[in-house]
Amino acid sequence: MARRPFLAALLLPVALLSACGSAQQASPSSTASSVPKSSQSQASAAPSVCGLPESGSEVSLTTAPTVDEWRYENQTLWPYPYAKAFGPGVVKSNGMRSCFSHNPQGALFAAANIAAMTTDQNLMNSPDNAISLFGKGSQYDRLAAKIRELGSFPVGSAADSRGAPAGFRMLDYTATEATVDLGFVGTSSGQSVNISIVYHLVWSDGDWKLRSEKDIPITSAVVPSFTGYVEWKVNG
């Protein structure tokens, strides 16, 4: 089946996170926060680390934000979006990207960039690169130690597989957390499959990062269609 090599590139990072302690399968619609209440206002008040715009009253996205350019790096499974207004505001010489605007658009762009970076073995061979994708949650130290023990953040092998962004759903958004569902069409050996990948993000140190709490911050599933998604395509 075509879905197997394509899904392999997604599920290895999830398997690593599952092994980091008390990780449990996260519900995409869950809005429960594991950030202590005493730190939530402090976290939401942290300004963008590179000065990108802060959030207004918007808490959802019903239309696709403008992408200045879709870019490819190191033959990742799919491209990543760039926009001056939303990020990434920082692109290191090694290809690591960070700093996204503190609003729903920034959370969406962060999730899409994390999606590309976590399928790029050239980046994930470095434990420091992988660890930098996570916010400072209750499982941060345990997760960082696990990644350093492995020496890298494993990326599945899917040499003949490619993916294209199809759409997104903003499942949850607050000033401190966001849950973003990205839809991709994956192709392998002439076959295609619709993939939903959910990213649980937290606003940490002035940027959107993967959560490092008790729940797995990345979950994926095969879906029959993208009904209910906001269309978001490279040529859309």
Image (cartoon, rainbow, N blue to C red):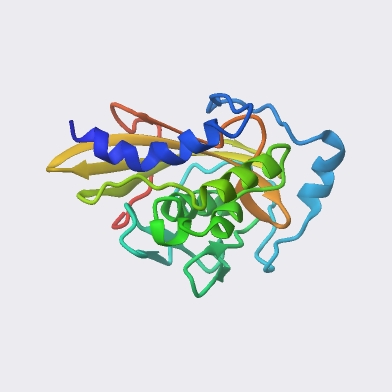
Residue 22: horizontal and vertical position, in percent? 63, 26
Instruction: Say if residue 58 shows up in the picture.
Output: no
Q: Quarter of the image containing the C terminus?
A: bottom left
234 sits left or right of 104 in the view = left
Name the residue rendered at 34%, 30% in the picture: 227
Which quadrant would residue 139 be assigned to in this image? top right
- Closer to us: 66 or 111: 111
Instruction: Say if residue 193 shows up in the picture.
Output: yes
155 sits left or right of 20 in the view = left
- In this picture, is 117 found above or below 218? below
Residue 91: horizontal and vertical position, in percent? 53, 70
82 sits left or right of 132 in the view = left
Task: Single out the residue that lies furthest toward the front.
Answer: 149
Q: Quarter of the image containing the N terminus?
A: top left
Q: Number of numbered discs present?
A: 0
- Closer to us: 99 or 67: 99
Name the residue rendered at 25%, 39% in the picture: 5
Name the residue rendered at 54%, 72% in the picture: 92
Which quadrant would residue 129 be assigned to in this image? bottom right
